[in-house]
Amino acid sequence: MKHTLRFIFNLALVLVSLTATAQEKKKDTIIPRTERYGLRVGADLYKIARSIYDDDYKGFEITGDYRYSKRIYIAAEIGNENKTTDEPQLNFTTKGTYFKLGADYNMYENWLDMENMITIGARYGFSSFSQELNSYKIYNANPYFSDESGLVKTSKEFNGLSAHWLEIVAGVKAEIFNNVFLGFSLRLNYLLTDKQPEDFENLYIPGYNRTYDGKFGVGFNYTISYFIPLYKKQNQPKVEEDTKAVKK
Amino acid sequence: MKKFLNIIVAVVIAFSFSACEKDDICASTTQTTPRLVISFFDRDNPDVEKSLSRLSAKAVGEAEPIVFFPDNLIGNERFQTSANTISLPLRLTGTETVYELTQNSDNATIANTDTITINYTTNQIYVSRACGYKTNFRLNGENPVTRPINDTNEWINNLIVETTNIETENETHVKIYF
């Protein structure tokens, strides 16, 4: 819970900084702008990096978004994870694939032909996975027998598990080279339902990440993506009243 | 663009504060692996609880008896209880635990040892991330607790099994009359 509160605070901090930016938009520009529409595809750098340095983790995530209107982007993520979690009392491996679909709203007013984004959005997430319990400990508050550690090595596999959740996403994307974007997003997850294994628990869900006592979880990604332009649209500037008067 | 970078930096810094967390700790209030709770009663007055006299309990195969008073570091006193209830840990592996219960364990001349054997099956149940699993015990339907008569001077007069399901320490599982 402490973790969740901290996250909400951080999210609020991000949103406050967004508001500050939004207030500084220029009102006097009348240059007609050409807005590019298209598809952006990318990958989560964090998952790739972690797959290299963490022996207990293999995973990837492919991201994509499609510009639907000036500010709205249809967004999706698809990924796969294979993670072994080692807790003092438990050791288990979670394997599975997830899919997230939703939209992002770009709150950032770009200058000229820049295409940077500060977005707030939402996703619906679904994951299909399995849990394998590798070992566990019998918790014993009163240890007495000298030959008993309580550790049980096992290999129990729980297949056909699934989870559904919602995400609130706050993100930024910056164009670092032509059509190449670097992005970062923070996610607050709310678990709707999940199919639990018998006599065990979904302590980690691919895409959703670690579960807590409540329904909330957190996530993030660090993406590099490429924008494929499909068509252009002229964005007519709003003609202000005094400009009309001059024309007469 | 500079403002933009500032925001990215702010987001990264903000997130880094939430990156570390404390591991959950198994709360002591959580019911985990239970012990066998034995209450002692007066043989002549079966409704009245009776206090033990410096009883020590040692499982066969262990070098030391159960420590009843872990805070009392002075010698053998921590092994001796004069309460009217004791809690005995059962072996997590196997199907029996044998205890030697010695009355007046502080005095070698009047010390009296009786042996009880607890026969059971185990059942492992998931508790939580922090606690892992626990073991519950089910005493055998026939001969749940046996009491071999080793000598003519048994201090235990009678033994009654109250419940065969050992799942909580909040109840008496076995009553011993002496």
Image (cartoon, rainbow, N blue to C red):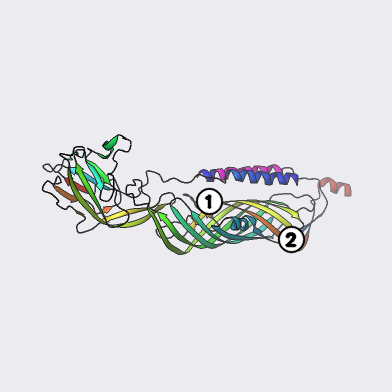
User: Within 10 angstroms of label 2, few (less than 14), some, or many (20 or more) residues?
Assistant: some
**Front position in the image: A174 or A110:** A174
User: Within 10 angstroms of label 1, few (less than 14), some, or many (20 or more) residues?
Assistant: many
Residue A7 seen in the current view: yes
The structure residue drawn at horizontal position 57% and vertical position 45%, both measured from the top left corner, is B18
Region of the chain picked out in magenta, as a range: A6-26
> Residue A217: which numbered mark, if any?
1
Name the kind of residue labelled 1 in the image.
Answer: Gly
**Front position in the image: B167 or A107:** B167
> Residue A37: which numbered mark, if any?
2
Q: Are marks 2 and 1 in contact (CB under 8 Å)?
A: no
The structure residue drawn at horizontal position 64% and vertical position 43%, both measured from the top left corner, is B13
Give the mark nearer the N terminus: 2 vs 1. Answer: 2
- Number of marks drawn: 2
Decide: is A206 above or below B72.
below
Q: At numbered mark 2, what does the secondary structure look like: helix, strand or loop?
A: strand
Q: Position of residue A138 (x, y in %)?
A: 37, 52
From the viewer's perspective, tell me whether residue B59 is left or right of residue B17.
left
Decide: is A160 above or below B144.
below
**Front position in the image: A6 or B42:** B42
